[in-house]
Amino acid sequence: MKKILIINGPNLNLLGQRQPELYGRQTLQEINKDLERLAQSLKLSVDFIQSNHEGELISALQRAAQEYHGAIINAAAYTHTSLALRDTILAINIPVIEVHLTNPAGREDFRQKSYLAGAAVGLVAGFGPRSYELALHYFSESPASPLRISI
Ligand code: DQA
């Protein structure tokens, strides 16, 4: 069974009360419960990590490379700032999918840049919690090692 680690970054522990007009009313626990159910039906095994700390997200990705077949990451604001997270994704040999609840491309200028997108195998954004679900579907359907092209 494929093992996938789902990683959430800063402030996503506040989902449910954080700007619900943008991010919805579901808590991260509720979203993760739904993802767990979906994963079971897709015959995937999933684990979840949330951290507000950049270094912990980096360590989570490095650990994922040892124990998981793939990772899904919503790095939240670190998406737009963290060269270190990009380097980690490039350094590890498992596919990583970047996800966002909102569509940063339709938001403020400072959200237009993703340091992670070019290192990830793909990006799903703008579908609320469905973004994570679509990424899980990819892992359930994909061959073991998709092509990663990075510069
Ligand atoms: C987010 C988008 C980011 O720009 C923002 O900093 C977040 C959440 C999203 O899921 O839509 O914290 O990653």
Image (cartoon, rainbow, N blue to C red):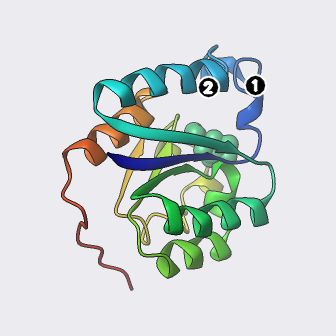
Residue 134 position within the rendered picture, expressed as x and y whole percent measured from the top left:
33, 36
> In the picture provided, is 2 more to the left or to the right than 57?
left
Amino acid on which the number 2 mark rests in the picture:
Tyr
The answer to whether the residue bearing label 2 lies less than 8 angstroms from the nearest atom of ligand 1 is yes
Q: Which dot marks residue 23? A: 2
Residue 35 vertical position relative to residue 141 in the rendered view, above or below: above
Residue drawn at (60%, 17%) of the image: 30
Q: Which residue is mark 1?
A: 18
Q: Which dot marks residue 69? A: none
Residue 86 vertical position relative to residue 72 in the rendered view, above or below: below
Residue drawn at (48%, 78%) of the image: 90
> In the picture provided, is 60 more to the left or to the right than 145?
right
Q: Quadrant of residue 87?
A: bottom right
Q: Alpha carbon of mark 1 to alpha carbon of mark 2: how far?
A: 7 Å
Mark closest to the chain's N terminus, 1 or 2: 1
User: Can residue 81 be seen here?
Assistant: no
Residue drawn at (44%, 48%) of the image: 4
Q: Quadrant of ligand 1?
A: top right
Amino acid on which the number 1 mark rests in the picture:
Arg
- Does the CB distance between marks 1 and 2 fall below 8 Å? yes
Q: Which sits in the foreground, 20 or 13?
A: 13
How packed mark 2 is, by other alpha carbons closer than 10 Å (few <14, some 14-19, many 20 or more), is: many
